[in-house]
Image (spheres, grey):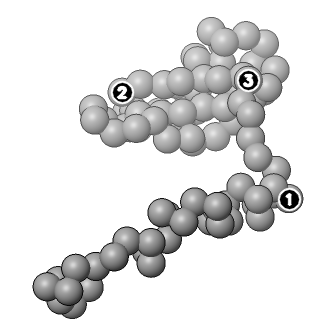
Amino acid sequence: MLYEVFIRSQHGVAHKHVGSLHAPDAEIAMNNARDIFTRRNEGISIWVVPSEAITASAPGDKQPLFDPAQTKVYRHPGFFKVPPEVKNI
C-alpha cells in the first residue's frame, strides 16, 4: 500500500508533506518514514496516511476550483465603498 508521509519539524508548525513510501501496514510505514525522512532529527511528529484516503483535485479541475466566484461580489475589492475621508488606498 502507498502511504503519504507528513513531518512536523517543530512545535507550532504544521505538518508538511515530505514524500511517499510503500509499506504493508501503517506501523511499518511509520517506522520506515522515521528511518527515511527523519535521519537528521528534523522531526518531532510523523503522520502516515494511506494515499487512497486522500481526495485530491485533478490538474484539469484547476479552472473551476481556483477561479474567483463571480456570484460572490463581496469578494471583489470594488464591492465595498471607501469613505471619502480615507485616503491612499
| Above or below, 19 relative to 5 | below
Label 1 vs 3, first from the N-terminus: 3
Residue 16 is situated, as x and y percent measured from the top left of the image, at 49, 41
Residue most toward the bottom?
Answer: 88
Name which residue type carries label 1.
Gly
Residue 15 x/y as whole percent = 45, 35
Sequence-first disc among 2 and 3: 2
Residue located beneath label 3 in the image: 53
Tell me the amino acid under the disc marked 3: Ala
Corner quadrant of residue 3: top right
Instruction: Indicate the secondary structure of the residue bearing disc 2.
Output: loop
Tag 1 or tag 2, which sits nearer the N-term? 2
Q: Contact (CB < 8 A) between labels 1 and 3?
A: no
Question: Closer to the camera, 69 or 8?
Answer: 69
Position of the N terminus by quadrant: top right
Quadrant housing residue 28: top right
Tell me the number on the disc at residue 60.
Answer: 1
Alpha-carbon neighbours of circle 1 within 10 Å: few (<14), some, or many (≥20)? few
- Which secondary structure lies at badge 3? helix
Task: Calculate the distance from the C-alpha at mark 1 to the C-alpha at mark 3.
Answer: 21 Å
Of 72 and 30, the residue lying toward us: 72
> In the rendering, which numbered label is found on residue 44?
2
Residue furthest to the left in view is 85
Cα–Cα span, label 2 and label 1? 36 Å
Residue name at image x 65 percent, y 23 percent: 49
Who's the residue at 48% across and 25% down the image? 46
Residue 51 is left or right of residue 36, and the answer is right
